[in-house]
Image: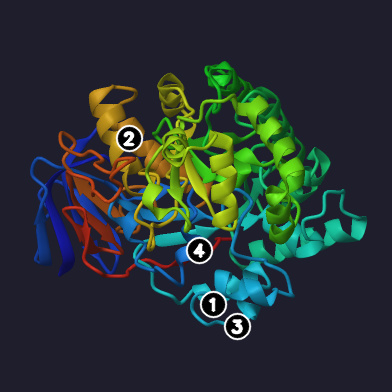
Amino acid sequence: MFDLLIKNGRIIDGTGSPSYLADVAIKDGKIVKVKKGIKGEAKQTLDAQGLVVTPGFIDSHGHNDSAIFTFPDQREKIEQGITTTIAGQCGGSQAPFGCDIPAEKIKMIDGVGMENEVYKTMGSFLHHAKDKPQGSNIAMLVGQCSLRRAVMGVENRKPTAEELEKMKALLREGIEAGALGLSLGLIYTPGCYADTDECIELAKVAGEYNAVVAAHIRSEGVTLVRATKEFITIIRESGARGVLSHHKAAGLEESWGKVTHTIRMLREANEQGVEIYCDVYPYHAASTGINTSFLPQEFRAQSAKDQLEQLRDPVKRAEITEWARKKWNNDLHWVQLVKSSAYPQYLGMRMDDIARMEGKDPYDMVYDILIESELAVTGVYFSIAEEDVETVLAYERAMICTDGGVAGKSSVFHPRVKGSFPRALGRYVREKGVTTLPEMIRKMTAMPAAVYNLRSKGLVWEGFDADLCIFDPDKIIDRSEFTDCQKRAEGLNYVLVAGEVVVEDAVHNGKRNGKLILREE
């Protein structure tokens, strides 16, 4: 007897091939038959007439590792069809945090009362996380910023030979414990202080294990082409498999259109034998900390206390403001506030509107918010051209991602957290025809499974894990908006993890069938 039988569905198997009509039989969490007219009894039957059946979506770039212990339902992932996420991205993994965690940091990184030993190494973190059931599967990368901070703090200098070996040893320990590879965060402190040679040395460790190196490259704006060239060099010299994270041309309009050139660079590198991919989220707005965009790198290397003191100093504040104004000009209408404990009444509003309501210069408003929120401020930045989004989505080696975690207790956030995958299918396949439905499904399933070596996921084939999505291709769409983030997707009928229905009509039923996925040898 089958555990579950899906009848009358149109199968899009993940390979990019055209759809076909068939039934899918599931037993013990695995797909055991895919064919027309499957005979036999089943404990549960789903009628997929008029719907498509696809592999569960794989978020190739997420940040929900911070929610493993605190929000294990992973609700925002599973309710948009994501059955697996590759987390620990942009250089910032939960571990290694370093052997001596300051007392004031314990509460921030440890919301469940665990000992600090959990965060010392990636191995210790994975050990404690592996038996914690999740709403959606999750796999980890080791973050370069985390490695550097654990060994060197946030010092702006080259590592000594001994320090570099310590970072490499921590990375090896993490990969051998089950991490899928390395993530670089070359725009964030302290990852931004690493030169190309240092990155190559770390990437070589990943290459030894046939593992992945994913990178938030050094610039996504004016110097995007140079930053892309650097990443290609890192991958070429290391022999690792590369993923250029959330590829885009962001910032002022002078940067727009450069993705045409950078994608040509990626194609040429692959033709030369360098294995490199990218991922992309289907939105024309980015999101990260306000301090990353409005404070110089050398300033962010200081302690939070020192940063706040200098922001309160009129002379230093004037210098920082001058730097930011030269970078961004005077108009901050493109910046939306989405996280600030000191100004909750303005969440979801644009920075120039907030400044007008407070009677302040926009930059004074930015820095006052940073001070009063003790630097814990996040923004959404409407700084990407729609045409560039479409260009990257259409690239044959582009995977789909959220670049997001889970909402947790937040009421305002980037809508990609809830809507990336339904949006790619509804807006960019059905409405705009950027690519075909089978090809988009490939970008969401089989391709990331192959890139990250998830051998039993990403295909509707016999013997593969029964992580599946069942949806109406004529209706699926995101509903989460920049000013109303809580809306669920439409047209997503069922999501299965390990052969059981965990989502119906885009609502999670509370089952935690997901788990931490460890690297396969």
Q: Which residue type does callout 2 highlight?
A: Ala
Looking at the image, is mark 4 or mark 2 earlier in the sequence? 4
Name the residue beneath numbered marker 1. Answer: 128
Q: Quadrant of the C terminus?
A: bottom right
- Foreground: 141 or 72? 72
Residue 255 in the image: above or below residue 342: above
Q: Is residue 453 left or right of residue 442?
A: right
Marks 4 and 2, how far apart in space?
25 Å
Q: What separation in Å lies between label 3 and label 2 (alpha carbons)?
A: 41 Å
Q: Label 3, label 4: how many angstroms apart (C-alpha)? A: 16 Å
Rendered residue at 53%/35% (across/down): 362
Give the number of the mark in front: 1 or 4: 4
Q: State yes or no: discs 3 and 4 in contact (Cβ < 8 Å).
A: no
For label 3, the crowd category at 10 Å Cα-Cα, with few meaning under 14, some 14 to 19 and many 20 or more, is: few
Q: Nearer the viewer, mark 3 or mark 1?
A: 3
Residue drawn at the location 46% of the way across and 44% of the way down: 448
In this view, the residue in front, 409 or 224, is 409
Answer whether labels 3 and 1 touch (C-beta < 8 Å): no
Q: Which residue is mark 4?
A: 66
Specify the farthest residue to the right. Answer: 161
Task: Quote the CA–CA distance across marks 3 and 1.
Answer: 11 Å
SS at circle 3: loop
Q: CA distance from mark 1 to mark 4?
A: 13 Å
Residue at mark 2 to residue at mark 1: CA–CA distance: 34 Å
Q: Which residue is mark 3?
A: 115
| Quadrant placement of the N terminus | bottom left
Amino acid of disc 3:
Glu
